[in-house]
Image (cartoon, rainbow, N blue to C red):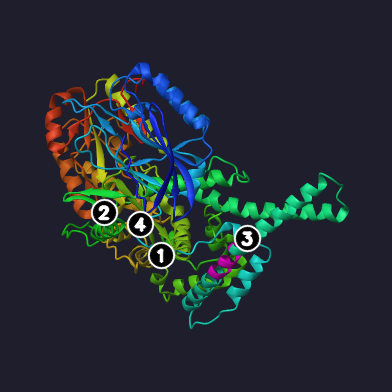
Amino acid sequence: MLVGVNLATYDIGSIEEGDFFVKFKVRCKKQDFISNLTLVYGPAQEDRKQRFLTELANLLSNETLPTLIGGDFNILRRPQEKSKGQFNNRWPFLFNAIIDAYNLRELDLSGRQFTWANNLPNQTFEKLDRVLITTEWEIKYPKATVQALTREISDHTPLFLNSGDGDSLPLHSDFKFELGWLLHEGFFDMVKDVWQSNDSGSNPMDRWQAKIRRLRQHLRGWAKNARGAYKKKKKLFLEKLDELDKKSEHTQLDLNELNLKHALHERVSQLLREEEIKWYLRAKVKNLLEGDANTKFFHLIANGKHRKTRIFSLDQEDGTITGDVELKKYITNYYKNLFGHPETSDVVLDENRRDDIPQVCPQENYLLTAPFTIEEVREAIFQMEHNKAPGVFWNVIKTDLMALFGEFYKGNLELNRLNFGNIILLPKVGEASKIQQYRPICLLNVSFKIFTKVATNRIIKVARKIIRPSQTAFLPGRNILEGDVVLHETLHELHKKNLNGVIFKIDFEKAYDKVRWDFLQQTLHMKGFSATWCNWIKSFIQEWLLFSNRKGPRQGDPLSPLLFNIVADMPAIIINGAKTDGKVNGVIPHLVDEGLSILRYVDDTVIFLDHDPEKAKNMKILLCVFEKLSGLKINFHKSEIFCFGQARECENAYSEIFGCKSGSFPFGYLGLPMHYRKLRNGD
């Protein structure tokens, strides 16, 4: 083992060696923080592993300082840490028992799933190298991360530990309302006074923006002072409690002292409750009840979430991008291009053909565009997630907020002044390394989100009428399992009765991000929505000042799922029209809608077809036309077909027609395995 230390930053104290470890006592000069750094090299030989684990347990039992232990442990922890081959649980069981017994936490590895390869033609990959830390060490370095570097000549991947104290890209500190502030006596009245003290502005939008800005500035300063007072009060109260506790050991406290002790307990509990709420919300541990006063636990969970979602590098065609500045530049340019102008298309829908399209009636259009009521706006706000909505100050803001809705109804509101948000990236897979493996979620400004939430509550009342039953997502009264049941019964019927048929499972590429705005508007018109409602929808999705997107509803907007459903309903209408003209045929009409159904849950789509290669070609043309119309792209190479009866003889032909592969059973749909026979445990 070789260790390099920057003596300008760290002092090295005592050094202790064992058969499988070297331990250093390290002092960080900048922070005057003393900890133990232990490097291990676990044996590969089975007959030496017991001695290694015994030495590791003895080492940990004598630790009194914050500790970091890292290196090649040569032991797995879980079956998924091995790419193939048998998993022997003997040593992992003992290893995990030691980790649990001494409350160690493993820092998640970024960049790779495995750290070792055997360099044989048919390689096996394993995760043998890791970094473990104690709670005390993590509290000192909450932003610490471990990143996998490039493996050169060794069969092990080097690990780079970053304490998180280095210089990184300076980020703008966004204002965050802390729920714990509500525990402060007089806080509500303070907010009310600040809000009502500023009525400057020539119109409701100017007044709203001025009030928000003034309140935000006031709370920033108040919170800064409150944090300083919090520390002083907590220290003072605890010292006084300790003094009374010590006194009570020798003499009985009088009534005034007992009352003081009780009051101090109440004040300390309130202070701790405020801190607990802060970290509870950051940790977002939904399986624990509120009131579980374990601030340290919530703090550690929040730190772990931060590490898992942080991006250290991204792979692209020209190599790997690293560093906060370069990553920000690359990600920004990528999404500017992604949300930029869509490809031009000269394909449009025939708006005169509406006979088979469910229509919004005049009465429903009137309700959609009726004046906004204070009851529906309040309902929309209080439907937002608990502890995240501005509902507690409803009586303070309602007059100004309703003035905004009044101006919006008249068509006089500059809604784009509220239409902004932050984009965060959430990994779709465990080891995301490419920008395409992240999902962009827009955290919208709450003032704007109230408008789209009210619009969502209105449109959802007509959504079930204008969206076909085969779409089961985001609609009251419809269940995700409905599609699974229909698909399973169809597969079973085709197999049991040896019927002819083709199942086409479609994979859409980045569905939300690709929808053309002009197609969305055309779809709304063809479903009978009024011009006023269409213009409102346009103002919700298009007028975004800070990031000029040109297509796609935003993930994170409560209105987006329903708008996408409306767009995704159009291929069913187009295909059913083709069926009426005899261009395509379906299967099993007593199970499947008109014998030709499109099962959908958002962008998970399955189409049922009769066995007819010529009509399958027509289906391919229809899907390509829909691509041009909507902007949605189908990954035909990732899609799959499943043939039954005589269609099996033409499986290669169908695969060539659709440009996709032949699937195998069981296949996954909406998280469940699908098969034509009864499922087994192995499925």
Tag nearer the camera, 4 or 1: 1
Disc 2 residue type (three-letter): Lys
Task: Identify the residue at horizontal 23%, vertical 47% (top origin).
Answer: 315
Dot 2 corresponds to which residue?
514
- Position of residue 393 relative to residue 610, above or below, is below
Of residues 679 and 129, the one drawn nearer to the viewer in this rendering: 129
Give the quarter of the figure containing the N terminus. Answer: top left
Label whose residue precedes the other's in the sequence (1 or 2): 1
Query: Which corner quadrant of the image does residue 483 belong to?
Result: top left
Tag nearer the camera, 3 or 4: 3
Q: Position of residue 147 (x, y in %)?
A: 32, 44
Q: CA distance from mark 2 to mark 3?
A: 49 Å
Q: Residue furthest front?
A: 14
Of residues 76 and 288, the one drawn nearer to the viewer in this rendering: 76
Dot 1 corresponds to which residue?
172
Query: Total marks drawn?
Result: 4
- Position of residue 283 relative to residue 559, above or below, is above
Dot 4 corresponds to which residue?
554
**Range of magenta residues:** 220-227
Q: CA distance from mark 2 to mark 4?
A: 11 Å
Label whose residue precedes the other's in the sequence (3 or 1): 1
Disc 4 residue type (three-letter): Arg
Tag nearer the camera, 3 or 1: 3
Q: Are marks 3 and 4 in contact (CB under 8 Å)?
A: no
Dot 3 corresponds to which residue?
230
Label whose residue precedes the other's in the sequence (2 or 3): 3
- Position of residue 576 relative to residue 182, above or below, is above
Disc 3 residue type (three-letter): Tyr
